[in-house]
Image (cartoon, rainbow, N blue to C red):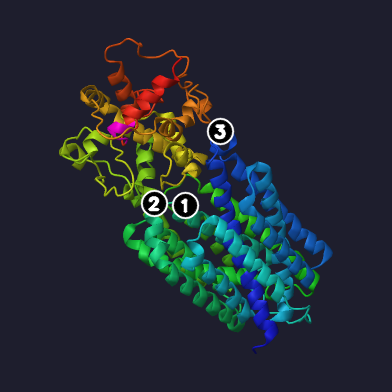
Amino acid sequence: MMSSVSIRAAMVIAAVYGYFLIFAQFAFIELLRGDFSGHPDRWFFSQGFAEKLVLGWMAVAGIGAGFWVAWKSASAGKIRGGLLLAGLAAAIAPSMSGLVGYAVIGILTGAAIGISTVSLATLIKSWCGIAWVGLGTGLAYGCCNLPMVFLQSPEHQAWIAAGFAGFGAVVVPSRGNFSAELRKRTLPFWGVLIVFTALVWLDSAAFFIIQHSQNLKAGTWGEPLLWRNGAVHLVSAVLAGFWLDRAGTRFILGFAWVLLAVAGLAVNEAAGRPFGGWIYPVAVSIYSTALVAWPAWFSGAESERAITWRAAWLFAIAGWFGSANGIGMAQSLFNVPQAFVIISGLAVGAVMMFSYRKYWRFFVPVAGVILAGFFTIQETPSRPSTPFERGKQVYLSEGCIHCHSQYVRPGTADESYWGPVREMASTLSSRPVLIGNRRQGPDLSQVGARRSATWIKLHFLSPQSFSPGTTMPSFAYLFETEKGADLVTYLKESGEPQIGRVMNVISTWSPSPTGPSEDGAALFSQQCAVCHGEEGRGNGPMSHLLGKAPANLVEGPFIWSADSPDRDLKMARLIKFGIPGTDMPGHETLTDDQIDALQKHLLQLRK
């Protein structure tokens, strides 16, 4: 029966889990990465230390806060307080910086989620029926998948999450009357912990892999599919609520696992991604609805205190522990591992079989999916064994081909910028062929001959520092695992065989300035100061990260003599193309007039 209290309860569920999804799992992590990727001199970020530490503190705070609620007892006031704390953390997160600042936000966020989720799981039974839990869970997923939410910047997502939390705090109902109604318990509590942990673990790993692989993401839930995903989440969660209300928990978790496992196997193949994109949100919405409702209705708890304790244990082990391990084990993976599907399936199937032997028929579909996983393992190529091969897979999975080519177009400015032109046969021999459209970035077929490995890595960490105004995002997260180093190896080794040809291009180029004089000092500040410093003394903000300190352009030593007859030409070529084999990059896209202005400014810097 519809009532204002039931509606408000659904809104609170939507607010709590919407906040968790859009802020704790998205915006907060992106803000953290963005802050540290802009400061690659913070050594611990390159190793993923800061992110792991902050998220670890958030998990500890969440678990501790959940058990604190179990110790003190749940209340509507605790939900309001938790949501207000959550809103505060999200609102101030965009203005934070550094490890300490983000640690504070992580702890506040974890504590707020722990208080809110455990208290909510205890009290929803006194406010509404199970079907309303499905509606609230579906609204959380549906709202977070709206393009105007999902595609916002991390800062805006944080403020949206603060709005979710504030709205939830306002609509929290007063304490209701506890219902002693008990639903049939189909699994012992130890089995519930195992099954939900397996589901959350597999979901977290699969989501992380798909979200961080451009090809998998585009075919599964890319930008054009967000409206569809939101609708599928909402409908599936609502139907799951009705299922739990009418039929209880019989088979629902196993059904959710089968869908999730099939989706995980499907997205590994291009032809299966559209199908996986449909069933993945169905599976997630079904088990998420069950997770929210389980402590109050299906855990066998006969009092609110018992519900609270079971909720605290369930969310600590299945929620925080399962999620953290799923993400942690997926850091360097390119596809959803079939082994993950098999291991989680064995756990789910074993619990079902040993808990209620009369449900043995259920193990048939589980066994079918497990066998499919075994066959898929036999047919799946082994993981690339060398850094070069793995780096190429990263190049493909991250979608680099959508902004960069690996083919210098003959008869165009490309020859001057990124040339020389390579034989078409060598380009077509690559599998896959990586000619690319290149509408936004430079050609990368010979970047390894023009840039050092150190420069390439630093550019991935902080593109804006080395290419002011670029639209390229930071890829600092790749360097939390071996992916970053492998990608650098691939780009470096791909271009190194072309060093001789690049040197020939450099030796035949000469500038022809014709236009009005450019502002050399401004160009130096924009293009060179990041390494050489504003005064040219080799002490720029990135200088200490290079293998060798940049040249002191004021005091020397200089690679050209003041009275050399070809001094100006050597300086112009150095500015234009850098020094292959060193960390000194070229500035290939600068015009001849800009090169001339920079050369004159360098001469003015000399004592």
Q: Could you tell me residue 260's position as x and y percent?
A: 48, 64
Q: What is the span of residues highlighted in magenta in the rendered image?
A: 590-594
Badge 1 vs badge 2, beta-carbon distance below 8 Å: yes
Query: Alpha-carbon neighbours of circle 3 within 10 Å: few (<14), some, or many (≥20)?
Result: some
Q: Could you tell me residue 159's position as x and y percent?
A: 60, 61
Q: Please name the residue that numbered disc 1 is placed on.
A: 339
Badge 1 vs badge 3, beta-carbon distance below 8 Å: no
Residue type at tag 1: Ala
Q: Secondary structure at mark 1?
A: helix
In reply to whether residue 593 is colored magenta, the answer given is yes
Q: Could you tell me residue 476's position as x and y percent?
A: 49, 42
Q: Which residue is painted at 46% across and 33% down in the image?
A: 525
Drawn side of residue 377 relative to residue 548, left or right? left
Q: In 3D space, how far apart are the residues under numbered discs 3 and 2 (Cα atoms)?
A: 41 Å
Residue 377 numbered mark, or none: 2
Residue type at tag 2: Ile
Q: Secondary structure at mark 3?
A: loop
Q: Could you tell me residue 431's position as x and y percent?
A: 25, 44
Q: In 3D space, how far apart are the residues under numbered discs 1 and 2 (Cα atoms)?
A: 8 Å
